[in-house]
């Protein structure tokens, strides 16, 4: 029976049907299947297949995003169950993301957030127009592995430097890695302001994030 | 040497892309969205105006739902025809529906140095150098701020960019880098100083303004407020959508047009509500996201289709259009940039987009390349000639000449040939040499374009403004910088 439900879960992710993923997760829990098994034998295989199809060019970004959506819907049901059993899915790392002060652009940042989540990172997206002080505050509260700063304008890009300075002033600079991105951001700008990482797109961001947390 | 501006005028070629029914469907769908879903206007000033004009406003979400007939009424006040003035009136650009004018692209952050080839961050001097070359080229009818003056303070950067261009050119200047009220007010002071006062500026706007929307269905507060200031002064103001299929707009093209259309016409309607009769224009640079990465593409069938379709919409609303054409995603001048820029520009001109952006940038409008600027100008030159079409009249049928030459022989020495041969197009950069000559030298378009750019940079030093005026502009900027010092912290 378990094998059947695992296969259905896997297929629901491959088919891009988040509602089905949710329903099958519910069904599996009700049938007494362990949440960790649901994840390991049902969901992760599905995400892996989606990942492979994406790498081979059969699947595209929307397929990844929809699969990640399905994964998230399942985790809403599974996290409380894991908590009860004092279990947790090993996270690749914690990331705080935000678009800097004065800037309201977010599609790139949202894509990065989704890709990081889909790759096992715990992501806290602070949204847009985020004050420098807020980044520092949240860094102190959440103790993330990485802070990701997005900007679309050359005039707001300067706030990426301000955040790095503020982290240093708060004594946090060596406790967190900083990644920067956005259309006007270049590798040389990232180096100049002392960022730890830069990528031109969401896929690149995942690679960099993995490297920064040492995996 | 610069002569008359080379724009497409009264073309004999046109393209049918959207039927009247298609346009009506898009318009109806757009009004439906604006009225039932709403558009975000994150500015209380803007919301006040919309509310006063019977929009349903949610102040928390800063979303306005505007009834369709209110939008239509506001848009009906927009002037269908007006002129982008130039400091030199012979360089004026009529937007009367019979021209396509080419501008430089913007706003890049890096430049390929003309002499060292180094890719480096852009400065105010670079803005000035690029504008000098753009001033030299007849194909460039107007300037956009091509690249960011990143060595200038953020709070006055856009003003330094205007100054840099006005120091070297009398052509019309359209800025896309002023996104707050304060800089807009100072920019108007600068423009007024050049033409001799605000009334003179209203009559002859040597500066026009472009603002970007934020897709889907949203605006930037500073952009709205800067736009209102521009509209008040009588500067032509346009709003540009860059809705991107699959990411910030529907993956289907018609749906993407609806989203972009809602953003643009709601902003133009706002301008007309605030200042009825102010000159406005539609602006667009819609595209498809690359489905593999989500990246902005800068070229492809979707871009080409949007390039043609958008002016049909702008015509429906009876306003001029500023269309993002050219602007290849290629990293260097070559096959990709030639394909993307030729096709996108062709399509935009085929429906007679009034203003085309823009020449000179690589990698999705991020890197200025002098080679590209000159090669793009050549593409434009080809289009200008192509769109002249084929004239069929007595002189062109040339029956007398055909009779005179008869069977055999040739037409080379004929008076008729000498009289009309200058109408045939000659390339600067297409290689038509004998094969063995090419084989020996192996040089070509890129080398020649770069050499020409270097020559212009070395030898062409226009100084259109008197020293007094230059000092005045400096003073205005300095005063602005003192007044708006950034907060420390």
Image (cartoon, coloured by chain):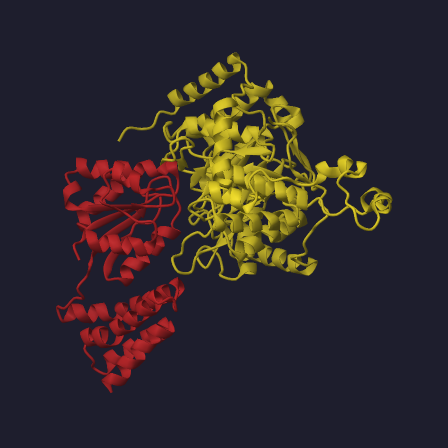
Chain colours: A red, B yellow
Q: Residue at x 39, y 35 (%)?
A: B117
Would you say residue B251 is visible in this rendering? yes
**B243 or B124: nearer the viewer:** B124
How many marks overall?
Answer: 0
* Quarter of the image where the C terminus of chain A is located: bottom left
Image vertical order of residue B154 relative to residue B423, above or below: above
**A146 or B450: nearer the viewer:** B450
* Quarter of the image where the N terminus of chain A is located: bottom left
Q: Is residue A17 left or right of residue B106?
A: left
Q: State which quadrant residue B475 falls in.
A: top left
Image spot of residue B312 (x, y percent) = 65, 51
Would you say residue B65 is visible in this rendering? no
Q: Residue at x 48, y 19 (%)?
A: B473
Q: Residue at x 31, y 37 (%)?
A: A159
Q: State which quadrant residue B282 falls in.
A: top right
Q: Residue furthest left?
A: A86
Image spot of residue B376 (x, y percent) = 54, 41
**B291 or A124: nearer the viewer:** B291
**B341 or B323: nearer the viewer:** B341
Image spot of residue B272 (x, y percent) = 61, 39
Q: Is residue A194 left or right of residue A70?
A: left
């Amino acid at each position: 029976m378990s094998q059947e439900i695992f296969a259905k879960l896997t297929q629901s992710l491959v088919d891009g049907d988040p509602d089905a993923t949710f329903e099958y997760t519910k069904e599996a829990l009700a049938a007494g299947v362990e949440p960790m098994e649901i994840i390991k034998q049902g969901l992760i295989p599905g995400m892996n297949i989606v990942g492979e199809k994406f790498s081979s060019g059969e699947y595209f970004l929307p397929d990844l995003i929809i699969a990640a959506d399905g994964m998230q819907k399942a985790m809403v049901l599974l996290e409380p169950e894991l908590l009860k059993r004092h279990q947790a899915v090993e996270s690749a790392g914690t990331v705080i993301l935000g678009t800097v002060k004065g800037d309201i652009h977010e599609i790139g940042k949202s894509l990065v957030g989704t890709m990081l989540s889909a790759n096992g990172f715990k992501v806290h997206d602070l949204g847009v127009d985020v004050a420098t002080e807020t980044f520092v505050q949240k860094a102190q509260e959440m103790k993330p592995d990485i802070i990701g700063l997005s900007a679309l304008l050359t005039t707001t890009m300067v706030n990426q430097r301000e955040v790095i300075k503020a982290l240093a002033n708060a004594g946090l600079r060596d406790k967190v890695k900083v990644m920067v991105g956005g259309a006007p951001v270049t590798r040389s700008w990232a180096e100049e302001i002392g960022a730890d990482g830069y990528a031109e797109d969401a896929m690149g961001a995942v690679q960099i994030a993995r490297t920064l947390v040492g995996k | 040497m610069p002569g008359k501006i080379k724009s497409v005028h009264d073309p004999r070629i046109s393209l049918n892309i959207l039927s009247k029914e298609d346009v009506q469907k898009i318009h109806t769908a757009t009004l439906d969205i604006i009225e039932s879903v709403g558009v975000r206007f994150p500015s209380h000033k803007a919301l006040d105006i919309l509310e006063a004009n019977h929009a349903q406003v949610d102040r928390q979400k800063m979303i306005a739902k505007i009834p369709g007939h209110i939008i239509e009424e506001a848009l009906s006040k927009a002037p269908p025809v007006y002129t982008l003035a130039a400091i030199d009136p012979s360089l004026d650009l009529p937007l009367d529906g019979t021209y396509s004018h080419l501008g430089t692209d913007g706003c890049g952050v890096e430049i390929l140095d003309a002499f060292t080839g180094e890719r480096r961050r852009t400065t105010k001097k670079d803005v000035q150098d690029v504008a000098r070359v753009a001033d030299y080229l007849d194909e460039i009818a107007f300037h956009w701020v091509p690249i960011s003056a990143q060595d200038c303070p953020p709070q006055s950067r856009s003003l330094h960019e205007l100054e840099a261009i006005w120091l070297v050119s009398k052509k019309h200047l359209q800025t896309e880098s002023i996104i707050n009220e304060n800089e807009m007010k100072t920019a108007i002071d600068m423009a007024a100083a050049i033409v001799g006062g605000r009334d003179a500026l209203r009559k002859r706007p040597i500066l026009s303004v472009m603002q970007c929307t934020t897709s889907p269905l949203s605006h930037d507060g500073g952009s709205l407020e800067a736009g209102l200031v521009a509209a008040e002064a009588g500067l032509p103001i346009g709003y540009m959508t860059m809705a991107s299929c699959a990411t910030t707009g529907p993956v289907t093209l018609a749906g993407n047009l609806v989203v972009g259309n809602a953003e643009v016409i709601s902003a133009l309607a706002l301008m007309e509500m605030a200042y009825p009769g102010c000159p406005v224009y539609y602006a667009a640079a819609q595209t498809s996201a690359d489905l593999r990465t989500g990246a902005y593409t800068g070229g492809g069938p979707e871009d080409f289709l949007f390039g043609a379709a958008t002016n049909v919409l702008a015509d429906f609303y009876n306003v001029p259009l500023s269309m993002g054409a050219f602007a290849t995603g290629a990293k260097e001048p070559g096959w990709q940039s030639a394909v993307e820029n030729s096709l996108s520009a062709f399509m935009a001109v085929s429906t007679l987009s009034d203003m085309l952006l823009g020449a000179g940038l690589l990698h999705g409008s991020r890197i200025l390349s002098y080679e590209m600027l000159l090669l793009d100008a050549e593409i434009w030159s080809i289009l200008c000639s192509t769109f002249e079409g084929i004239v069929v009249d007595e002189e062109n049928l040339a029956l007398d000449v055909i009779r005179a030459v008869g069977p055999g022989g040739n037409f080379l020495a004929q008076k008729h040939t000498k009289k009309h041969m200058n109408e045939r197009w000659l390339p600067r950069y297409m290689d038509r040499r004998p094969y063995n000559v090419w084989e020996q030298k192996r040089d070509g378009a890129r080398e020649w374009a770069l050499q020409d750019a270097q020559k212009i940079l070395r030898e062409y030093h226009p100084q259109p403004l008197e020293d007094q005026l230059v000092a005045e502009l400096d003073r205005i900027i300095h005063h602005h910088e003192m007044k708006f010092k950034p907060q420390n912290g």
